């Protein structure tokens, strides 16, 4: 109860938008904090370098808006968004990432993000998104992001099993190894591969991985 009252008192004492920044690169975190500190109505009240830490800081500070990177060590940004939104359905989260894949956008909005902002966009776009999300507008996406979603709708759907096969391909596994790991026959693996080739409009495994990475279906470490 004391923690809840402390948060409420902190909010009452300031008219600024209180922001949590979850980003694993310290210089990027500091840059974001510096940028937002120049806005009279914004303040980064806390930050985190991992998804797990981001959840802890969200519980502790109850920020108005959370900026979440997707590529984090350990728990992914997507999983952190899901956990934060599970605990606090009214939490307002903006994805701030380098990922340009159409599937990244879709999964983020599906997880409950209110906006998707690319790191290489103008800072004004991030500032506007923060204000809009704070005022309850969602989902918010730039023209580029909307274009990615439209492109996803034009593509054939990849099933969860097909995605598993693609992920195992990215680890360099052969059909026999994939079959053993998934508990299916090699013939079934071949059927999945044929379907994947057709859906991604490619002819070999190398092309599968190239298209899957570009679309955000998988990410290579």
Image (cartoon, rainbow, N blue to C red):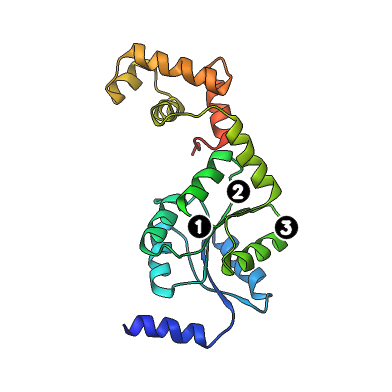
Name the front one of labels 1 and 3.
3
Image side of residue 88 versus residue 17, left or right? left
Q: Position of residue 199 (x, y in %)?
A: 53, 22
Image side of residue 169 versus residue 188, left or right? right
Query: Of helix, strand and loop, which one carries label 1?
Result: loop
Residue under circle 3? 122
Any part of residue 31 in sight: no
Q: Position of residue 119 (x, y in %)?
A: 64, 54
The answer to whether marks 3 and 2 mark residues whose Cβ atoms lie closer than 8 Å is no
Any part of residue 37 in sight: yes
Whole-angstrom CA distance, mark 2 to mark 1, is 13 Å
Q: Where the N terminus falls, by quadrant? A: bottom left
Whole-angstrom CA distance, mark 3 to mark 2, is 13 Å
Query: Of helix, strand and loop, which one carries label 3?
Result: loop
**N-terminal of the two: label 3 or label 2?**
2
Residue under circle 2? 98
Query: Of helix, strand and loop, which one carries label 2?
Result: loop
Q: Is residue 116 above or below residue 174?
A: below
Whole-angstrom CA distance, mark 1 to mark 3, is 21 Å
Residue under circle 1? 24
Front in this rendered view, residue 126 or 174: 126
């Amino acid at each position: 109860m004391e923690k809840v009252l402390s948060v409420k008192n902190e909010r009452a004492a300031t008219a600024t938008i209180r922001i949590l920044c979850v980003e694993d690169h310290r210089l990027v975190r500091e840059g974001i904090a510096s940028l937002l500190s120049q806005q009279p109505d914004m303040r980064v009240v806390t930050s985190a370098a991992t998804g797990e830490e981001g959840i802890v800081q969200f519980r502790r500070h109850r920020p108005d808006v959370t900026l979440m990177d997707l590529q984090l060590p350990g728990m992914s940004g997507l999983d952190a968004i899901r956990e934060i939104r599970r605990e606090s359905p009214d939490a307002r989260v903006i994805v701030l990432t380098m990922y340009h894949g159409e599937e990244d956008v879709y999964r983020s909005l599906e997880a409950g993000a209110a906006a998707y902002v690319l790191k290489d966009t103008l800072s004004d776009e991030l500032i506007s998104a923060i204000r809009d999300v704070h005022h309850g507008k969602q989902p918010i996406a730039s023209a580029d992001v909307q274009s990615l979603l439209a492109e996803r709708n034009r593509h054939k759907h990849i099933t969860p099993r097909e995605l598993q096969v693609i992920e195992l391909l990215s680890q360099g596994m052969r059909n026999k190894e994939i079959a053993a790991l998934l508990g299916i026959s090699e013939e079934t693996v071949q059927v999945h591969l044929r379907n994947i080739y057709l859906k991604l409009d490619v002819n070999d495994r190398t092309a599968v991985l190239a298209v899957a990475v570009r679309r955000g279906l998988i990410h290579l470490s």
